[in-house]
Image (cartoon, rainbow, N blue to C red):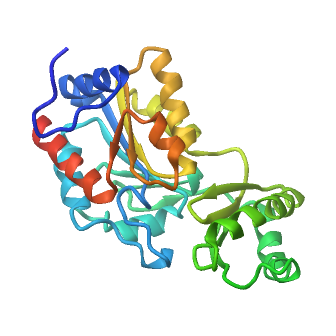
Amino acid sequence: MGSPPHDLPKPTTTAGRDALDALLRDPAGTVVALDFDGTLAEIVPDPDQARAHPGAVPALAALAPHVGSVAVITGRPAGVAVRYGGFAGVPGLERLTVLGHYGAERWDAVSGTVQAPAPHPGVAGVRAELPGFLDGIGAWHGTWIEEKGRSVAVHTRRAADPQLAFDSLREPLAELAARHGLIVEPGRAVLELRPPGMDKGVALAEYLAETGARSVLYAGDDLGDLAAFAAVEKLRSNGLPGLLVCSGSAEVVELAERADLVLDGPAAVVEFLAALAAAVG
């Protein structure tokens, strides 16, 4: 095995080093898959104000022509991620795919359109019940609801004690979700009520099978990315090289512990992608 170029950080695990070597040897066989919030964009108090790091699109546009495929896999609606990322109409990103709502929605740069199934009926039920539900359990103050179309999220980051609010809401919201046939997806100071059956691991595995990937790089920062990490770990056990990157955060220790490479947030992720583009270009 060779060594990565000097300006590329070295993974701390053997599996990660092997995967980076595979990517550098055969970039055309590699899928680069990335979370959005916390990985390509900084976490901000108001999710509607999140935007991709200024260097993200240039780095991806430099990298994408040299690898098999680039995909963004996010819990956001696909169209929102495209807008907040500034991904549409960018030279170099003509084959970009965005898998939104954990893979339930799909946008590709070729068509410029979003493909999606009919909404789960339970989302409308939760949407109608949630304001009164939060008020009834005394959890309205300091929390707020984000409408995501195919899911609904309750944020606690503005509460006096965000972690206490998060912990106290987790079980009641799980019960509410279950009554409507939904599940709760925990994140960084957010609990999302969404339909079951799809997660980032399922979305990533299906996309890799579709593209015929010979190796994969996945980067994420949050609890929802654990499913994608697990999917890569399973594929690695079957012989497919996979590099797991954590966009470092003290809020999600488990992700960092399972990563081959921990980077210090979106700025460092963008720097890594740019260095990767230079190495394979």
All told, the count of numbered labels is 0
* Residue 6 location, quadrant: top left
Position of residue 154 in the picture relative to residue 238 (left or right) = right
Q: Position of residue 49 (x, y in %)?
A: 43, 79
Residue in view at x 57 percent, y 40 percent:
227
Identify whether 255 is placed above or below 170: above
Position of residue 169 in the picture relative to residue 41 (left or right) = right
Identify whether 113 is placed above or below 60: below
Q: Quadrant of the C terminus?
A: top left
Position of residue 185 in the picture relative to residue 200 (left or right) = right
Residue in view at x 85 percent, y 64 percent:
176
* Residue 88 location, quadrant: bottom left
Identify whether 123 is placed above or below 101: below
Position of residue 148 in the picture relative to residue 271 (left or right) = right
User: In this rendering, does residue 107 appear at all?
Assistant: yes
Residue in view at x 18 percent, y 41 percent:
276
Q: Position of residue 223 (x, y in %)?
A: 57, 49
